[in-house]
Image (tube, grey):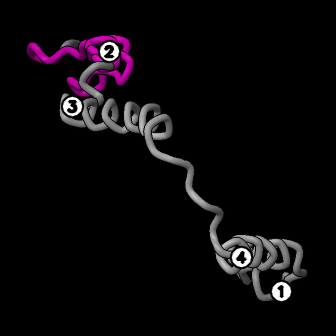
Amino acid sequence: MEKSGLRRRPLAQGHVAGLKSPQANMNNRIIVPSSYFSAQSLMVLFCLTASLLILPLILPPLPPPPLMLLVLPIGIFLVLLILAFMPSDVRNIASSYL
């Protein structure tokens, strides 16, 4: 016994309730790598590159910085090195609901 005109149609593979599969959407999408950067950002990158290549050839060499400015990055490095190897209390770090 069939119901009056109500038949179940089998779902096509990749379609669920009228939605296309994600793979079908990925195949239809066109990726254009040139639109990743705008023309203005490309111009800024080009000018920065040119200035980094040309200015060192034009400008005279600079004198060395004062000793205190050289000690600052070394001090920051030492502090970070001490913090990296400092033991920590694992009981305070681990969460209680694991």
| Image quarter in which the N terminus is found | top left
User: Do callouts 3 and 2 mark residues in contact (Cβ within 8 Å)?
Assistant: no
Position of the C terminus by quadrant: bottom right
Q: Earlier in the sequence, mark 3 or mark 1?
A: 3
Q: CA distance from mark 3 to mark 2?
A: 29 Å
Viewed as shown, does residue 27 lie left or right of 83?
left
Pointer 3: residues within 10 angstroms few (<14), some, or many (20+)?
few
Q: Residue at x 90, y 81 (%)?
A: 87
- Say which residue label 2 marks: 24
Residue at image mark 4: 67
Q: Nearer the viewer, mark 2 or mark 1?
A: 1
Q: Secondary structure at mark 4?
A: helix
* Residue identified by numbered label 1: 91
Looking at the rendered image, the disc whose residue lies closer to the viewer, 3 or 1, is 3
Query: Magenta stretch?
Result: 3-32
The CA distance from mark 4 to mark 2 is 63 Å
Out of 35 and 78, give the one closest to the viewer.
Answer: 78
Q: Are marks 1 and 4 in contact (CB under 8 Å)?
A: no
Q: Position of residue 41 (x, y in %)?
A: 25, 36
Q: Which residue, given by chain and number where applicable, does mark 3 sit on?
A: 38
Real-space CA distance between mark 4 and mark 3, rounded to the nearest whole angstrom: 43 Å
**Residue at 28% from the left image edge and 17% from the top image edge:** 32
Picture coordinates of residue 59, whole percent (x, y): 45, 44
Q: Earlier in the sequence, mark 2 or mark 1?
A: 2
Above or below — where is 32 with respect to 74? above
Label 2: element kind: helix
